[in-house]
Image (tube, grey):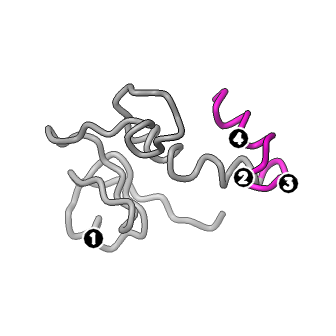
Amino acid sequence: QDAEVVRTRDPQRLAQCDVVVDVGGEYDPERHRYDHHQRSFTQSMRSLRPDKPWTTKLSSAGLVYCHFGSQILAGLLGQPEDGAVVTALYDKV
């Protein structure tokens, strides 16, 4: 809610960010880095969440959805993250 959005490709500025999306050249969810532009990047929903059937290579938006979609939907709906309603809506979106 109170996040500051910074648009930059400056590596020094990116290093100071809590979350980096679509720039920076790395995918590292433990460090909240969600870029898909590396030649070696091949992640899909299925490779990251084996319970899901989709094998299309993810974009940065897809990575954010993969990692945070259920949590966001649960918060918006006031439902448990692992509940049937959240799971069904997550799969539909």
Residue that numbered label 1 is attached to: 15
Residue type at mark 1 is Ala
Cα distance in 3D space between marks 4 and 1: 34 Å
Which residue lies at the image location 72% right of the left edge and 34% below the top edge? Answer: 89
Which residue lies at the image location 47% right of the left edge and 44% below the top edge? Answer: 49
Residue that numbered label 2 is attached to: 82
Secondary structure of the residue carrying numbered label 1: helix
- Residue 78 circle label: 3
Image vertical order of residue 52 relative to residue 66, above or below? above
Cα distance in 3D space between marks 3 and 1: 34 Å
Is label 3 or label 4 in front? 4
Residue type at mark 2 is Asp
Mark 3 or mark 4: which comes first in sequence? 3
Which residue lies at the image location 78% right of the left edge and 50% below the top edge? Answer: 76
Q: Which residues are magenta?
A: 76-93
Cα distance in 3D space between marks 1 and 2: 33 Å
Q: Residue furthest bottom?
A: 16
Image vertical order of residue 18 relative to residue 67, above or below? below
| Image coordinates for residue 48, horizontal then vertical, percent | 41, 46
Residue type at mark 3 is Gly
Is label 4 or label 1 in front? 4
Query: Depth check: 33 or 16 in front?
Result: 33
Examine the image and state in which quarter residue 59 appears: top left
| Crowding at mark 4 (Cα within 10 Å: few <14, some 14-19, many 20+) | some
The reply to whether the C-beta atoms of the residues labelled 1 and 2 are less than 8 Å apart is: no
| Image coordinates for residue 41, horizontal then vertical, percent | 23, 41
